[in-house]
Image: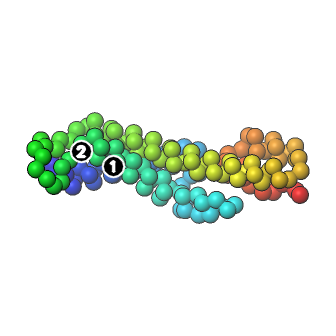
Amino acid sequence: MDIGWMILIVVVCGAAGGFVNVFIGDNGLHLPKVENGVLQPGYMGTVFVGAAAALASWGMAKAFVFSGSAAVPPPTFSTADIANALLLGFGGAKWFKSENEKDVLQKTAAIAAGKPADANAALMIASATPNQALAAAAGMHQ
């Protein structure tokens, strides 16, 4: 199999793993947008990170020599490479979403800390998704 096809398969499988991650959590299927001052990368960002994570992992595992005189056996491609790409695509996308949600929750805490105590908002923030918590904090009265 040609190395170009191997790379394409790995990227597609990584993107598929990232796409599965889109439906876990509260983000859902949406395009990139800025909401309450925080960038929400949407499914396109998650899919891209999944594909990049899978390709990077596969590239490190295979370590092809593109130029030079090193004797390298011909590349192989197996079902393990496909499974690894799917798993790394999912994991990379999960990390990316977690980082984004951390930013949302930090902004939520900063907004809520600057306002007077509000028991209703506190209950909402404690049980809401990160984006809902940010909206609740932004809606707190001065």
State the image coordinates of residue 24 (x, y, percent, origin top left): 54, 43
The percent position of residue 126, horizontal first and vertical second, equals 75, 40
Q: Of discs 2 and 1, which sits in the foreground?
A: 2
- For disc 2, the marked residue is 63
- The residue labelled by disc 1 is 55
Between 12 and 63, the one nearer to me in the picture: 63
Q: Splitting the image into 4 quarters, where does residue 125 fall?
A: top right
Q: Quadrant of residue 85?
A: top left
* Residue at horizontal 42 percent and vertical 49 percent from the top: 50
Task: Check disc 1 and give the amino acid type.
Answer: Leu
Helix, strand or loop status at disc 2: loop
Q: Earlier in the sequence, mark 2 or mark 1?
A: 1
The residue at 47%/47% (across/down) is 93
Q: Which label number is shown at residue 67?
A: none
Q: Nearer the viewer, residue 67 or 77?
A: 67
Is residue 106 visible from the viewing direction of this image? Answer: yes
Tag 1: Cα neighbours inside 10 Å, few (<14), some, or many (≥20)? many
Q: Secondary structure at mark 1?
A: helix
Colouring rule applied to residues: rainbow
In this rendering, position of residue 4 left or right of residue 110: left
Quarter holding the C terminus is bottom right
Give the image location of residue 130, x and y in percent. 67, 47
Q: In whole angstroms, how far apart are the C-alphas of marks 2 and 1? A: 12 Å
Label pair 2/1, CB-CB below 8 angstroms: no
Determine which quarter of the picture holds residue 8. Answer: bottom left
Q: Residue at x 28, y 36 (%)?
A: 80
Q: Position of residue 49 (x, y in %)?
A: 44, 52
- Residue depicted at x 15% and y 48%: 1
- The amino acid beneath tag 2 is Ala
Q: Is residue 94 above or below residue 139?
A: above
Residue 16 visible in the displayed image: no
Q: Nearer the viewer, residue 65 or 97?
A: 65
